[in-house]
Image: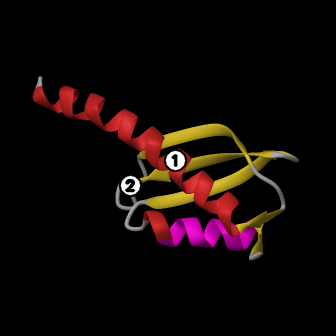
Amino acid sequence: MNKMTFPNACQVMRWHFHPLGFEASMDAPRSMIVRLFDRESGETVLAIAGIPCSAVMAASDVERIIEAVEDEMAAFIPSLALRTAV
């Protein structure tokens, strides 16, 4: 099984979400906060707290985190479309 440290997992997620900016930090021993942001303006696009993680994660755990963030983005995007339509 492929294992990676928290900083390496964050790098994988940065590459995945590029061109958006990606920041993550552990807010407790078993959870993290993720922030996606516009690289040009620095404006936060999405922030999620309490995502389960650990200091060393399997590749499948990183995939699960990416899917959770993408699901939150998908739920958030329709409200952005409504705001710009008004």
Looking at the image, residue 21 lies above or below residue 15: above
Of 83 and 9, nearer the camera is: 9
The label shown at residue 82 is: none
Of 33 and 61, nearer the camera is: 61
In the picture, measured across the screen, residue 13 lies left or right of residue 20, that is right
Describe the element under mark 2 as helix, strand or loop.
loop
- Give the residue number, with chain letter if any, for mark 2: 38
Quadrant that contains the N terminus: bottom right
Q: Amino acid at mark 1?
A: Val
- Give the residue number, with chain letter if any, for mark 1: 69
Residue 51: percent from left, percent from top: 68, 42
Of 7 and 66, nearer the camera is: 66
12 part of magenta stretch: yes
- Residue at 53% from the left image edge and 67% from the top image edge: 14
Residue 85: percent from left, percent from top: 11, 29
Residue 56: percent from left, percent from top: 83, 65
- Which residues lie in the magenta part? 6-15
Please tell me which of labels 2 and 1 falls first in the chain.
2
In the picture, measured across the screen, residue 84 lies left or right of residue 18, that is left
Quadrant that contains the C terminus: top left
Q: Amino acid at mark 2?
A: Asp
Q: CA distance from mark 2 to mark 1?
A: 15 Å
In the picture, measured across the screen, residue 5 lies left or right of residue 63, that is right
71 part of magenta stretch: no
Q: Residue furthest right?
A: 29
Describe the element under mark 1 as helix, strand or loop.
helix
Q: How many marks?
A: 2
Residue 61, by quadrant, is: bottom right
Q: Residue furthest front?
A: 1
Kindly tell me whether residue 45 is visible in this rendering: no
- Residue at 71% from the left image edge and 53% from the top image edge: 25
